[in-house]
Image (cartoon, helix red, strand yellow):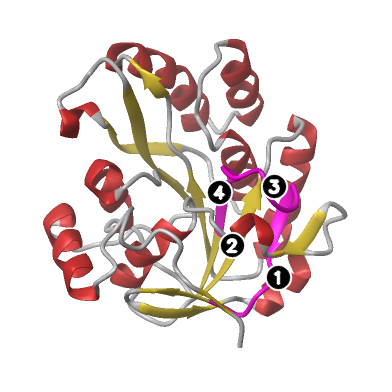
Amino acid sequence: MEVRKPAVAGTFYPADPQELKKLLDLLCGEEPPQKIRAKAILVPHAGYIYSGKTACEVYKRVEIPERVVLLGPNHTGMGEPISVYAGDAWETPFGVVEIDAELREEVLRFPYARADELAHLYEHSLEVQLPFLQRYAKREFKILPIVLAFMEYELAKSFGRFLGEVLKDKDALIVISTDMSHYIPAQEAKKKDEILISAMERLDTEELYYKALQYNITMCGVIPAVVGIEAAKVLGATRGIVVDYSHSGQVTGDYSQVVAYLGMIFV
């Protein structure tokens, strides 16, 4: 069995399971009594001390089904443009989660999707989501991690629609991993991010894509968001709901150069 070992345990989040549990307890607080059956969610992927609370606000509100598709940006530049994880399982301090091999074969029918491990080797954007999923899952689940490079809008949209069709008859959740504006003043980040948040609330992926380019908004997961939202629309989603918005300055005290974090639920 080919198991991906954690690349960022001990840096982005604690490598010790007890320490990790304590940190999540601290960040996440109480679970709401009723859970939302979401088509997709959007969550950040920075170190837990910075973005963990925003991620928690989303994860604790949604049901974790038997299948989870993870969509994240390619920070390393390695591997295939549409990189579908080729191995058998991923490991975190909380244990091992199996890859959904059956779903992978269906997704690989998309002409530009490739089975690949290189893009996933050091990529943190999907790995950091797993401990949250493991914490809140009430039953066993499988994952399908997909890392996406920057691409033309029409290709991203096409892959999203294809993914939605694949998931139509399945109990699945799409996880879009992205941070928002990077390394600009907090006030400017909020102003810019609101442009993209408005588009995502209305599920308008074309506006999301082109406004990000037009205004030079450094949301790293624009492509995962286009793909995930298009897939969610095929699954019947009609709107995006903002759950939380925060930035690194609220932790560091430096509001002059922040990274911003968004939590959304698509229903």
Q: Nearer the viewer, mark 3 or mark 2?
A: 2
Disc 3 vs disc 2: Cβ atoms closer than 8 Å? no
**Which of pointers 1 and 2 lies earlier in the amino acid sequence?**
1
Dot 1 lies on which element?
helix
Seen in the picture, residue 211 relative to 118 is either above or below; the reply is above
Seen in the picture, residue 5 relative to 238 is either above or below; the reply is below
Dot 4 lies on which element?
strand
Residue at the spot of label 1? 104
Please report the residue visible at 53 percent of the width from the left and 53 percent of the height from the top: 123
Q: Position of residue 77 (x, y in %)?
A: 66, 43
Residue at the spot of label 3? 160
Q: Nearer the viewer, mark 3 or mark 1?
A: 1
Residues 143 and 22: in front is 22
**Which of pointers 3 and 1 lies earlier in the amino acid sequence?**
1
Dot 3 lies on which element?
helix
- The CA distance from mark 3 to mark 2 is 14 Å
Q: Give amino acid for label 4.
A: Gly
10 Å crowding of disc 1: few (<14), some (14-19), many (20+):
many
- The CA distance from mark 1 to mark 2 is 9 Å
Residue at the spot of label 2? 145
- The CA distance from mark 3 to mark 1 is 15 Å
Q: Is residue 85 magenta?
A: yes
Disc 2 vs disc 4: Cβ atoms closer than 8 Å? yes
Please report the residue visible at 17 percent of the width from the left and 53 percent of the height from the top: 27
Disc 4 vs disc 3: Cβ atoms closer than 8 Å? no
- Toward which corner of the image does residue 249 lie, by quadrant? top left
Q: Nearer the viewer, mark 4 or mark 3?
A: 4
The answer, for residue 37, to whether it is visible in the render is no
- The CA distance from mark 1 to mark 4 is 16 Å
- The CA distance from mark 2 to mark 4 is 8 Å
Q: Is residue 234 magenta?
A: no
Q: Give amino acid for label 3.
A: Gly
